[in-house]
Amino acid sequence: MTDTPLSTAPLLLILPLIGFAFTAAFGRRLGKRAHIVPLVAIAAVWVLAMGLAIPALLGDPALGGEGSSLTLFTWIASGDLIFNVGIHVDGLTGALLLVVTSVGALVHLYSVGYMSHDGSYWRFFAYLNLFMFSMLLLVLADNLLVVFAAWELVGLSSYLLIGFWYTKREPGLASKKAFITNRVGDVGFALGLMGLVAVFGSLDIHTILAGIEAGALTGPAATVIALLVFCGAVGKSAQFPLHVWLPDAMEGPTPVSALIHAATMVNAGVYLVARMSPLFAASHEAMLIVAAIGIFTAIFAASIAFTQTDIKRVLAFSTLSQLGYMFAALGVGAWIPAIFHLITHGFFKGLLFLGSGSVIHAVDGEQEMPKMGGLARKIPITYATMLIGTIAIAGLPPLAGFWSKDEILGEAFKFGFGWVWLVGLLVAGMTAFYMFRLIGMTFWGESRVNPAVRVHESPWTMTLPLVALAVPTIVAGFLLGFPFADGILVHGLEPVFAPANELLGHEHEAWTLFGIDGLLMLASVTIAAIGTAIGIRLFSSDHTQLLSSITTRLRPLYEGSRSRWYFDDLNDLVFVQAGGRVARALWWFDRRVVDGAVNGVGTIASSSGRGLRQIQTGRVQNYALGIAVGLIAMVIVYLMVAA
Amino acid sequence: MPLPPTIPFIGITWADALFLLLGGVVLGSATLVVLGRDIIRNGLMLILTLGALAGIYVVLGASIVAGAQVLVYIGAISVLILFAIMLTQSKSASAQLNFQTQALPAALASALIGILLAVALGATQWGSTVYNDTPDPAGTATAAAVLFGPWLLAFEVASVLILAAVIGGIYLAMKPAESEEIEA
Amino acid sequence: MSMIAGHLEPYLVLSSLLFSIGAFGFLARRNAISMLMSIEVMLNAVNLAALAFGAFMPTLAGQGVAFALLIIAVAAAEATVGLAIVIAIYRNRKTPLVDEYDAMRQ
């Protein structure tokens, strides 16, 4: 091993792979002990990852700034096209590693308790390790082709994990939906990659970014390629219109929802756009579209979360909404706040999901909130940690969510995107409202739980990760984001986004408490507080009369929100039904015309055969006459030709 | 008294007259062979045809072939044919049609063949010698030199062929052997 | 002086006419033995032509006669076997008429 700072980096990839292979091969035989190897592997990965991430974020000369690269081997060498597999670590990588490995390790621990009753225990851990490998490969890769491969691998792991209980109908359908929707986005992604190869002749990230910095890609070409790459992000990170798979993905076990659909995989799209920030910065139109889709998804998903009754689905739509925030931030050029929010969201959303899993476990599998209530006293640890997570996501200071969300909104306004700011503000209020609705319906008021169920707190393997995640939920915002515009994260990520900022013409500004920044902060805190207050007021105890009167007055909105604004029905109509008709028409064509032509040839052959068969009279004299006639014909022809 | 060089009053040589006479007999009896109704009469007409042809062979100067023709063709083959006719007679022979349905096309075809052949053969410049009276090839001696010289193999093969034909003919024409009585 | 018997062409014309007569008989008669007789006629026509060539072409001296003798031998063999076959079929089918031999008809 050479003595580069990245000498331990390949282990980050090898360890989960070994964990997966080992568990896949021997897991069944190990039974209840199948988690040991994967868990140890991930713990080791976490230690190594922290060893790389923390120096990178703190501005270590080798890992911070531009970062370091390590080429492992050449994958494809075809004439002028060379694709290497290598690892690159810088501040952005560090940020992602932080979230991915921390939440990943805690989810592994959590799963020991959560999946303990499951017959395919070993398979779960095998898939989890496979997923960790894919995600780490995606984050560490320095060549877009490897990123694409890891992209697909992550999608595969997600498919396997969503459909973990494949013997039931819904998980199978949900995993298919996830994979297919992702695939639609990936088509755009692949086209974008082809565009990049056409322009730069390589998919090496450094080559491309350096080329863009030097002005090699501008104008409509930049817009098209950027948007195509964004297609992949739209699919993977479930933005409108490819958001439909995420709510259905809740069919998977809760640890899966926490890990993949909150803290890691869905962040892949955000990471991709952030990593390719110069590409987007080269096109104002593309950035605008990214911001528009992001903020639209945010309010779209938040409005649906108002009326959902399944606890996991509320959290799923909440994830969609927060991801929308991140893309809105990226779209307006607020790169660092987007990544900041990625980190904080990873922690508190992971916490919320694991907490919901604990709640579900406590009430013996019930997921509908109307059947919960009054659980606060009975499952205190879960309640406390979930409350912390809710306060964080509502954006109330001084918890993590406040810091990152406020920065997004602030920079949106300051860069001149007033509409993004306004909608974002509204969504912040909505978020606070529906999250406290969730807390209220689950933990407060009278118990509506089935009396036969014995409500019990979860084992330590489940509550420990909850507590562990509560810590960064409380302090991460402060640690990484204070002082404003001058904190650790800003310094760690500034060099990464410097090229993009240069293209945009953004400069580092100081933060003024008694200026525009303070006002904006006041606005966001106020609206969060209002949302919280309304939520608490309506859901702290049973206010069924009040609630039903509200819903009656707003019946069309209520129904629309519950049906997810009929978007799934639209998809069904346009693609499934219409697609079915088209398919049937084509089948008719294939049967009648294409097969008809082929069959026609056969029929011609057999009917002409039947006709020509009449010549075979079986009589020798007819044949002899034939010979004579043939002879005459040949002689005549010969004589004519010879003459 | 030697014959005059040409036939009196008509002025064609004897050879020509002989040729014309024999040729006419050949054609006429051949026509009767193929057109006659009674099949035995056809066989007899065949004998007549073969005999007249033997005469033409003599005019050509190939007396040995004429002899072979008479011995083999008339003496053996025609007799064989007559035997076969008698063996395969059916009672309703007189009432049957003699010609097939394809007789008319057959007539056309054969007429065309004949015309084509005649025209082609007659019009080609063969570079042949012209004789005053009748052809004067070297006769039997030369033929024997050829037959037992370069064509010896063909001669031997022909004898083998005849042997095979004899055996085959006997075998084909044998009555099928009776199956043995099964012991009761 | 002989206008006809001393030239090659008349013999050839006679041969071809005889051949066509034989061909007609072969193609048009119903009785198998009639067909065989017609075949003999055709063979004789060929014989005549061969002899004529042998007589009039100096390079073919003697070969015409040898060829004709061989043809006679072959004709004899062929007539033997042919008639034997006709008799065998007659035994089977009870008729010498070729019209009725159509077991190979489609």
Image: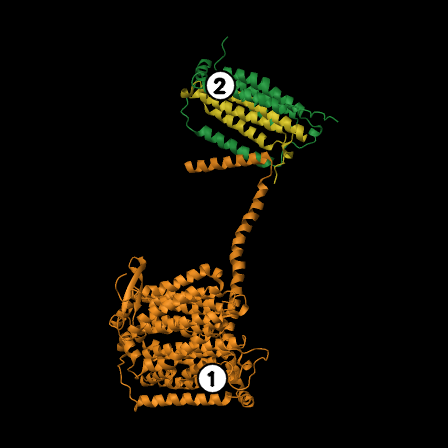
Chain colours: A orange, B green, C yellow
Q: Chain of mark 2?
A: B
Dot 2: element: helix
What x and y, as percent, mark residue B19?
A: 51, 20
The location of residue A275, given as percent across then percent down, is 32, 72
Where on the picture, by quarter, is residue A481?
Answer: bottom left
Q: Is residue B16 left or right of residue A499?
A: right
Instruction: Classify A84 as above or below A270.
Output: above
Q: Position of residue B66 (x, y in %)?
A: 52, 17
Q: Residue furthest front?
A: A460
Neighbour class for label 1 at 10 Å: few (<14), some, many (≥20)? many
Callouts 1 and 2 on one subunit: no
In percent of width and height, residue A276 lies at 32, 72
Residue position for label 2: B156
Q: What whole-number distance in Å separates the C-alpha atoms at marks 1 and 2?
A: 117 Å
The quadrant the N terminus of chain A occupies is bottom left
Give the amino acid at mark 2: Glu
Task: Give the residue displayed 32% in from the left and 83% down from the top.
Answer: A411
For the C terminus of chain A, give its image quadrant.
top left
Whether residue A277 is situated above or below residue C40 in the rendered picture? below
Q: Exactly how many numbered labels are in the figure?
A: 2
In the image, what residue type sits under mark 1? Tyr
Which of the two residues, A107 or A315, is positioned nearer the viewer here? Answer: A107
Which structural element holds mark 1?
A: helix
In the picture, the disc for residue A122 is none
Residue beneath label 1, please? A434
Q: Tell me the subunit letter for badge 1.
A: A
